[in-house]
Amino acid sequence: MKASVIVFPGSNCDRDAAVALEAALGKAPTMVWHGDAELPQSDLIVLPGGFSYGDYLRSGAMAAHSPVMREVVARAKAGTPVLGICNGFQVLTESGLLPGVLMRNASLRFICKDVMLKVERNDTLFARHYAEGEVVRIPIAHKDGAYFADEDTLDRLEGENRVASVIARRAARRRRQNPNGSRRNIAGIYNETGTVLGLMPHPERLADAALSGTDGAKMFTSLVETLH
Ligand SMILES: NC(=O)CC[C@H](N)C(=O)O
């Protein structure tokens, strides 16, 4: 399996994603600079977290127009799996590969903390090593993490089983609201075919016992087992 991690100016989780991928895969992914119009043959493309282009205009808005994104969009449309983590999720909505938008957190503050996530489905290449309904601990670190879409889109996402994970209900109730104010507690969504996943929390940040948890590792081992 060949994986590529796209690096934008301002990405800061690209190396963490590469380390988590390498631990699961046994070999390093290719790091691809945003200005490259060429993308190597890839079985998986990762759009990492960070502050691409300093989050100017809107988080992910400028990165969506990077030269490399033309090829990423084309490959995604042709079926290549794409994982967008945090800023990567923002790039996916801004480039139209996923519906909706990530808005400023309800508190208007940057939030960096672990959240409890409920895995809504495990019949995808990203989640097969999780149990359906499993509650896992994964960190968030963002200021624009409030998922927003109109009610029809939210109904469609839920109806088509495209919600990947939600902030676990017990945690949301305790805080009255989930930490960022996402509609319907959504933390991650899939495209129609389940091959593109946008996720606000960072599985790569809890993917090694030395980081105090391994709940995130199963996403990378799921991908490696499915894609070889
Ligand atoms: N960790 C990240 O990817 C940060 C995402 C984004 N730039 C925000 O703060 O909303």
Image (cartoon, rainbow, N blue to C red):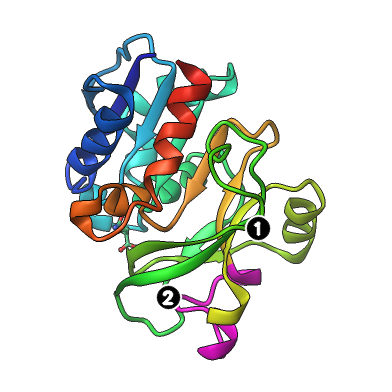
Which region shows up in magenta? 172-185
Q: Quadrant of residue 33?
A: top left
Q: Within 10 Å of the Cα at label 1, are there few (<14), some (14-19), or many (20+) other Cα atoms?
A: some
Residue situated furthest top in the rendering = 41
Task: Check disc 1 and report its element: helix, strand or loop.
Answer: loop
**Residue 28 shows in the view:** yes
| Residue that sits furthest to the front in the current view | 209
Q: What label does residue 133 carry, if any? A: 1
Question: For disc 2, does the CB lie below 8 Å from ligand 1?
Answer: yes
Q: Is residue 192 left or right of residue 172?
A: right
Residue 57 screen position, x and y as percent: 33, 58
Percent position of residue 30, x then y:
23, 20
**Which residue corresponds to the image point at 29% horizontal and 16% vertical from the top-left?**
37
**Which quadrant holds residue 148?**
bottom right
Q: Is residue 179 magenta?
A: yes
Q: Residue at x 17, y 41 (%)?
A: 9
Residue wearing tag 2: 105
Reading the chain from its start, which is encountered first: label 1 or label 2?
2
